[in-house]
Image: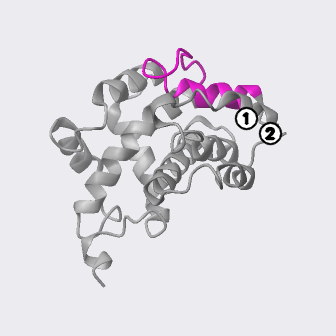
Amino acid sequence: MELTFEKAKELNKDMVTEEHLIIHSRNVCYAMEAMAGHFGADAEHWKAVGYLHDFDYEKYPEEHLQHTEQPLLEAGVDPADVRAILSHGWGICSDVMPQTDMEKSLYTVDELTGIIQACARMRPNGIEDLETKSFMKKFKDKKFAAKCNRDLIRKGCEMLGMEIAEVASICIDGMRPHAEEIGLLGTEKASD
């Protein structure tokens, strides 16, 4: 079965129900869509994998990715896509090392989008006018969005052979058109 965005949404429907996790899945899927564009890959496919990446997290936060492989394979998800999803937890809750551009991208943007989201939420215009240099300032401030693993982001960017700023810029551009859906319109519009 080819994994489409619609299929990914259907699979996640009963598994990912908490608003903040849905928003995170969307952040990652739009960042992945943009990364696919960068690599000249199938954007719809990467977007679907991004959306599905935290399939078991809400139900099994302490056993993340241990309840992903079997159900997704049984649902007909391609083993390569399941492997990509498992690889985003490499070194944390999975021993599947990211190897393809899609796997390395997912591994990197999962944490990176958390910092982008935190940056955009503080700004009057949200992600609309968030520039990469502003993101990088916040990235360097270890106290800002402290739960986001910067070492992992650095490692992911190294694996991709890309600078952090370049990956961040691609992700911001990918997330920007969806600002309203992902709650990143900014402090001014949020209070309207």
What's under tag 1, amino acid-wise? Pro
Tell me where residue 101 appears, x and y as whole percent.
Answer: 57, 27
Apparent side of residue 22 relative to residue 144 in the rendered image (left or right): right
Is residue 130 in view? no
Q: Percent from the top left, x then y, of residue 111?
A: 39, 37
Which quadrant of the figure has residue 120?
Answer: bottom left
Q: For the residue carrying disc 1, how many other residues have a C-alpha within 10 Å: few (<14), some (14-19), or many (20+)?
A: some
Q: Is residue 172 above or below residue 38?
A: below
Q: Quadrant of the C terminus?
A: bottom left
The quadrant in which the N terminus is found is top right
Answer left or right for 53 relative to 191: right
Vertical arrangement, residue 144 with respect to residue 97, above or below: below
Under tag 1, what secondary structure? helix
Q: CA distance from mark 1 to mark 2?
A: 6 Å
| Element type where label 2 sits in the image | loop
Residue 56 lies in the magenta stretch: no
- The chosen color scheme is one colour
Residue lying at the far bottom in this picture: please name it. Answer: 192
The reply to whether callout 1 and callout 2 are in contact (CB within 8 Å) is yes
Give me the residue at 56% from left, 24% from top: 87
In terms of image quadrants, where is residue 123? bottom left
Which stretch is magenta? 79-100
Q: Which residue is mark 1?
A: 71
- Identify the residue at image location x=56%, y=29%: 65
- Which residue is at the front of the view, 151 or 135? 151
Q: Is residue 159 visible?
A: yes
In this rendering, the answer to whether 185 lies above or below 135 is below
Q: Which three-letter amino acid code belongs to the residue tagged 2? A: Ala
Residue under label 2, please give it. 75
Q: What residue lies at 69% left-to-right and 42% top-to-bottom? A: 42
From the viewer's side, name the closer residue of 129 and 18. Answer: 18
